[in-house]
Amino acid sequence: MVNLTIWISLVFYASAVAVSFLVLDDRKRQKTYRILWRLGCIFALSHVLFAFHFVHHWDHQAAVKHTLIETERVTGIRFEYGIYFNYLFLLVWTMDCLHSHHDRLELARQKSLRCIWGWFVHLYMLLIILSATIVFEEGLIRYISLVVLSLLTLIYFRSRSIKVHAFRKG
């Protein structure tokens, strides 16, 4: 159950990102994106709660040790602060979900700040997700993650070319 929640979360994450590239209607894109984005965040938060309850038995040191062992196994480096990058991941995602709830007109006035925040959110999340699914995972999960990343990259570049073509036409 613990691992299932994070994989469901990542499916919602990838779906939200794909929607942001594929859906042309602004209102439909924003509404669908926000729903998928928030569901992904909820499942990521539930993953942490389930992990702390079922795996670490509400012992933060046990969670730190687990992360340290995994980091050392994969990288050969004994780094005990890796769990805090995971906490930051959840904090950033949660803050972004809460931030997207604000009035859209107010956000439009803060467009450049929102754009910088959006890039930070997606780049940091992508870094953590790639690390978790490609660097720290093995076997089928790694290959599925590479395929999904490749598909999202193709969708992104295809959507950019469509938008540029539409802009030049219009």
Image (cartoon, helix red, strand yellow):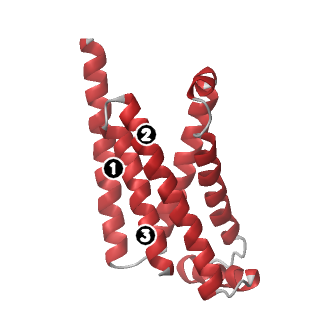
Q: Residue at x 58, y 47 (%)?
A: 97
- Secondary structure under tag 2 reads helix
Residue 102: % across, % down: 62, 35
Q: Which image quarter: residue 22?
A: top left
Please state which of residues 71 and 61 is positioned toward the viewer in this rendering: 61
The quarter of the picture where the C terminus appears is top left
- Secondary structure under tag 3 reads helix
Is 110 on the left-hand or right-hand side of 44?
right
- Secondary structure under tag 1 reads helix
Q: Amino acid at mark 2?
A: Lys
Q: Which image quarter: residue 20?
A: top left
The residue pinned by badge 1 equals 152
Q: Residue at x 50, y 68 (%)?
A: 132
Q: CA distance from mark 2 to mark 3?
A: 22 Å
Residue 24: % across, % down: 31, 31
Residue 128: % across, % down: 54, 61
The answer to whether residue 160 is seen in the rendering is yes
Q: Tell me which label, 1 or 3, sits earlier in the chain.
A: 3
Please state which of residues 153 and 117 is positioned toward the viewer in this rendering: 117
Residue 110: % across, % down: 64, 25
The answer to whether residue 76 is seen in the rendering is no
The residue pinned by badge 2 equals 31
Is 157 on the left-hand or right-hand side of 138?
left
Q: Tell me which label, 2 or 3, sits earlier in the chain.
A: 3
Q: Amino acid at mark 3?
A: Trp
The numbered dot on residue 7 is 3
Q: CA distance from mark 1 to mark 2?
A: 20 Å
Eyeballing the image, is 119 above or below 74?
Answer: above
Please state which of residues 22 and 105 is positioned toward the viewer in this rendering: 105
Q: Which image quarter: residue 139?
A: bottom left
Q: Tell me which label, 1 or 2, sits earlier in the chain.
A: 2
